[in-house]
Image (spheres, rainbow, N blue to C red):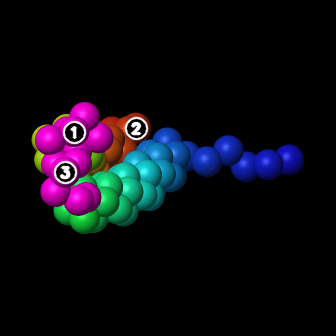
Amino acid sequence: MTKQLSRPQRWQNAINLLNSGFSELQSLREEYTDWKDNLPENLQSSALYEKLEAIADSQELDDLESNIADIEGLELPKGFGRD
């Protein structure tokens, strides 16, 4: 019989997945930024450049980092009168 993980353990596992996914998004953002920064001058007015710039300057990705930190900082209830 497999022991079920507790809610706090499941919470921490989910936080770990969020952090791992965010780290991968940051790495990809850096790759896209490098691509944008190394485009030839004649492509710096193109749709490709605009898409790369949108990724590089993504406020949503910056907000995600803050939101993950906020979620990670939440104090979980202990329950059964221990709070």
- For the residues marked 1 and 3, what is the alpha-carbon distance in whole angstroms? 8 Å
Q: Identify the secondary structure beneath mark 1.
A: loop
Specify the label residue 42 is tagged with: 3
Is any part of residue 62 visible from this angle? no
Q: Position of residue 46 (x, y in %)?
A: 22, 39
Q: Nearer the viewer, residue 67 or 26?
A: 26
Q: What amino acid is found at the position of numbered circle 2 in the picture? A: Phe
Q: Is the residue 39 above or below the residue 66 in the image?
A: below
Quarter of the image with the C terminus in it? top left
Query: Seen in the image, is 20 located left or right of residue 83?
Result: right
Residue shown at 52% from the left, 46% from the top: 10
The stretch of residues the image draws in magenta is 39-50
Residue shown at 73% from the left, 49% from the top: 3
Mark nearer the N terminus (2 vs 3):
3
Q: Nearer the viewer, residue 48 or 16?
A: 48
Query: Mark 1 near mark 3, Cβ–Cβ under 8 Å?
Result: no
Query: Mark 2 near mark 3, Cβ–Cβ under 8 Å?
Result: no
Q: Position of residue 81 (x, y in %)?
A: 33, 39
- Kindly identify which residue carries mark 2: 80
- Kindly identify which residue carries mark 1: 46
Q: Position of residue 56 (x, y in %)?
A: 20, 51
Residue 49 counted in the magenta span = yes
Query: Seen in the image, is 59 located left or right of residue 72?
Result: left
Residue shown at 43% from the left, 52% from the top: 21
Query: Seen in the image, is 27 located left or right of residue 62?
Result: right
Mark nearer the N terminus (1 vs 2):
1
Is any part of residue 50 visible from this angle? yes
- For the residues marked 2 and 3, what is the alpha-carbon distance in whole angstroms? 66 Å
- For the residues marked 1 and 2, what is the alpha-carbon distance in whole angstroms? 60 Å
Seen from this angle, which residue lies furthest top?
47
